[in-house]
Amino acid sequence: MAMLALSGGVGGAKLVAGLAAVLAPHELTVLVNTADDFEHVGLCICPDIDSVLYGLAGLADPVRGWGRRDEQWNFLATLGELGGPTWFALGDRDLALHVYRTALLKAGQDLTACTATIARAFGLSVDVLPMCNEPVRTRLATARGWLEFQDYFVRQRCEPRVTAIEYFGAGTARAQPSVVEGLCQNRYDAIVICPSNPLLSIEPILAVPGMRDALRMTSAPVVAVSPLVGGRALKGPAAKILTELGLEPGPSAIADRYADLLDVLVIDTEDEGAACPGSVQVVTAPTIMHDDAERRALARAVIAAANGRPG
């Protein structure tokens, strides 16, 4: 099976790790949101790419749910002593990746090439690709004005009410060429939209010109995994923002975001019986991934759904 997975951060990275465990490395390509990327203390930081890389390499922190395991915080403490910004937590091990990425970019590599360089250094064979090489940035209109994503998400802890979202720069970006070509030439046997926030992680990918059209045209089944369980997000503000935008957080809202693309929606067993658009097949499976076994189990359920078999 040749599978393309669209992923954001933590939830997407968990399913990607599960897929990588049950597929051969050459069978999986991961297209990752980069609209969360930003520059901080002079460094290029790509949170979603890093979550996927750490998850695949077995380096993710299982306690915090983000960043690297066995982290230390000497850099952050010293930065605070100097009067620098400490609202975005940069651990020492994590910092090394950001420094190296920034150096590779300054040396002339694009984001695709430097992501591949880092993936090889981690011993990974799975293709991990940024959605594009050009900068795209998610911005949110809130009661406190327009906020950059990391300002809203980290510094302001998702507290302001959101009234609109834009993906600044998406209109002039170029979708990952190898992925668009693969979709148009039907090289993938299945497309998986990981359980990532549809508004903040997946729709930035779809906003890059050509990407949504290519997904519409492909003959491969498109399977999405809902990031919501019982109307709540396991991590992050998906349910909160959907509600603030006047949408009922649940399977139907997720299916509606991808209605023009979607063939199958995988929902949690807690949501069994939930209504979805008539054209979308609904498959029920445990979607909460506490450990490797649960990640692999969900991955197998997703593959079964793509193949038209019971989970």
Image (cartoon, helix red, strand yellow):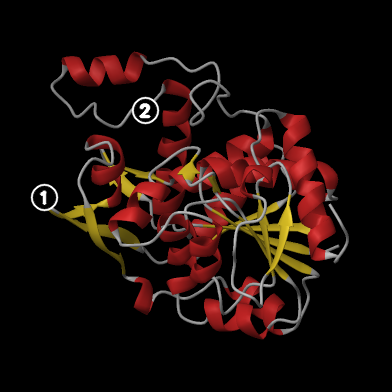
Up the image or down, 134 lies above or below 18; here it is below
Up the image or down, 18 lies above or below 105; here it is above
Residue reaching furthest front?
Answer: 273
Using residue 119 as the reference point, say whether residue 98 is left or right of it.
left
Q: Secondary structure under badge 2?
A: loop
Q: In the rendering, which numbered label is found on residue 268?
A: none
Q: Secondary structure under badge 1?
A: loop
Q: Residue at x 64, y 76 (%)?
A: 278
Quarter location, residue 87: top left
Using residue 28 as the reference point, say whether residue 256 is left or right of it.
left
Q: Residue at x 41, y 23 (%)?
A: 91
Is there CB contact under 8 Å for labels 1 and 2? no
Q: Could you say where residue 32 lies in the image, as x and y percent from the top left?
A: 54, 56
| Count of numbered circles in the view | 2
Of the image marks 1 and 2, the number of the one nearer the N terminus: 2
Q: Residue at x 59, y 75 (%)?
A: 177
Tell me which amino acid carries mark 2.
Leu
- The residue nearer to you, when weighing 156 against 4, is 156
Up the image or down, 154 lies above or below 275; here it is above
Q: Could you say where residue 86 lies in the image, as x and y percent from the top left?
A: 24, 26
Up the image or down, 187 lies above or below 47; here it is below
Q: Which residue is identified by label 2?
A: 90
Q: Which residue is identified by label 1?
A: 144
Quarter location, residue 69: top right
How would you rate the neighbour count of disc 1 (Cα within 10 Å): few for under 14, some for 14-19, many for 20 or more?
few
Q: Nearer the viewer, mark 1 or mark 2?
A: 1
Asked whether residue 118 is in view, the answer is: no
Tell me which amino acid carries mark 1.
Arg
Q: Could you say where residue 93 lies in the image, as x and y percent from the top left?
A: 48, 24
Of the 4 image quadrants, the one containing the N terminus is: bottom right
Cα separation between marks 1 and 2:
26 Å
